Amino acid sequence: MRIEKQVEAWVAASLIEPAQGEAIVRFEAQSPRRSWAMYSVVGLGVLTMMSGVLSIIAANWEDFSQAGKLVGYFLLLSLLGGLCVKSRPGVAREALLLAFALLLLCGIGLVGALYHLESDGWTGIAFWLLLALPVTLLADSILLPNIWFAGFYGALALWAIGSSEPEMDRVMWSIAAMYGTLIGSFALAGSVSVYLLRAARSWAVLMGLGMGGAFASIAWQHPTDKLHHTSALPSVAGVGACVLAAIVIASQGKHFPRGAAKLAGLAVLLSGLMILPPFLVDLPYNRPLACLVFLLPWSAVAAAAATADRKRLFDFAIFIVGARLVGIYFEVIGSLAATGIGLIFSGALILTAVYAWHRFRARLAAFIRERL
Amino acid sequence: MNRTLVAVVVPILVLVLWVAKLQLGATTGAEVTLSITGYDPRDLLAGHYLRYRVSYDLETLCAKASKEPTCVCLEYSSDAQRHQATWAGSCEELSSKSCGPLFLRGVCDESRFVAGIERYYIPEAYSEVLATVPGDASIRVKLDGDGSSQVTAMYVGAERVEDYAQRLLSARKDPE
């Protein structure tokens, strides 16, 4: 709700005087507001331009000599760098930092092409992560940190997949690295950019509960002996990182409202229960168990979100839990001949669930808060 | 010191040093000529490149599929007018062989010896006439004496591949 409407409501409820309401509105109008939409659109523009630069490099124009390409590139990079140094905090500076970081990536591609370097994919991105880290630490928005972590997980995935088939030790090390970034994002709070830490947490949750959850759903329901060939050290690293991340987050009482830290730590622990077993043991085919290990971490996320008063996260987590429960229903009746009746009933069930969720979500959130 | 200045200058310096190292490798060291055969995929990050197999002409090379580091000794063959492999084995045995500076360090990827020289980037404009590696193609490689190598040029016969492709393109546009 915009501030003017809120103030109107407060004045109408006699919570504040009209003069106070006007002073609040004047004050908010003067305060610099960060428009997330503008940052997103600017980010899109910069990404598009840098994709164009990369494409030009990929074309490898024969009209320019090798020296000419390198000189032109370093001049452009220096110019962008100079503009970054001279710029003032704001949208323009964030755009320049992003463009500079992406131009570093273009430079790696250019040098690789000019000197015919062999690449396995992840080494180039890893090199870029190191080069771009200094400017990423300076970013005053989530834009560049998000791109940096996209590169981080991209490189991790390419490394884990390997040249021809996934190597299980590398997959386990990647999982350990994911939990490691979560640990670092809390351990380094106050020492590095808050936007970098925020991006670290968001991407760890996306990779863990999102990608990891999707993969785990498949692995648990279709166990295969191709997965559990992980060596001792990476297994210990994966499990250890998960447990340590859970402990670190559970101890962050000052960053979370009461109770939410412990629930968030529980969610991390349960995510490990979901992701790690396929790589550690020979799983039996057990659909109820597979569904349970998927639902548990998401339920913990919903509980933590309710306690922390994070409505959107709560709604999203409840939606995931609800969708999975409905999915289970579809899986059970899927083999019956009378699927038509079953689908009508399922549709009615979905509508009922949606109505109940819409009508009672506030009470559900309050119930969870009271219990905790 | 201005943090932004440091954050900007350091990566630029690192890139400059990297280019300097590669340029030094491309201009110093022993040069060898190796025959090749291959095909053309695309690298999304860096553009069109020709991917090929280097013909070492040594049957025992990578006979046992393993990812252990392998070294290959090279010697010039006046018949083939190219360098060919005379010995291949564990790099720890290299000191007992009289290779001199002409040796490559790599790994056996299944039955293929890979030394990081199996790729050559070409301008996009040439891709239509260089869909595959032409016959009688070879690469010039600089060796640094420590087994590291760097491709510096590709030839089709005695002609640089860029000139060869340019000639084919011109012939297509003007058949007469």
Image: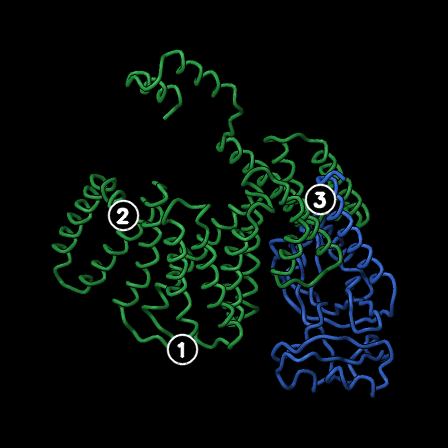
Chain colours: A green, B blue
Residue A87: image quadrant is top right
Q: Which mark is residue A225?
A: 1
Q: Residues within 10 Å of mark 1 (few under 14, many from 20)?
A: few
Q: Secondary structure at mark 2?
A: helix
Position of residue A318 measured from the top left corner of the image (x, y, whole percent)? 29, 48
Identify residue for label 3: B7
Position of residue B137 measured from the top left corner of the image (x, y, whole percent)? 75, 68
Position of residue B32 measured from the top left corner of the image (x, y, whole percent)? 83, 71
Q: Secondary structure at mark 3?
A: helix
Q: Is disc 1 in the same subunit as disc 3?
A: no
Task: Specify the subunit that label 3 lies on.
Answer: B
Task: Specify the subunit that label 1 lies on.
Answer: A
In space, the residues marked 1 and 2 are separated at their CA atoms by 40 Å
Q: Considering depth in this image, is B59 or A16 the residue closer to the camera?
A: A16
Q: Secondary structure at mark 1?
A: loop
Task: Specify the subunit that label 2 lies on.
Answer: A
Identify residue for label 2: A368
In space, the residues marked 3 and 2 are separated at their CA atoms by 46 Å
Q: Is residue A8 left or right of residue B14?
A: left
Q: Considering depth in this image, is B43 or B29 the residue closer to the camera?
A: B29
Residue at the extreme top of the image, as rendered: A19
Between label 1 and label 3, give the one nearer the viewer.
3
Residue depicted at 50% across the width and 68% down the height? A172
Q: Is residue B18 left or right of residue B101?
A: left
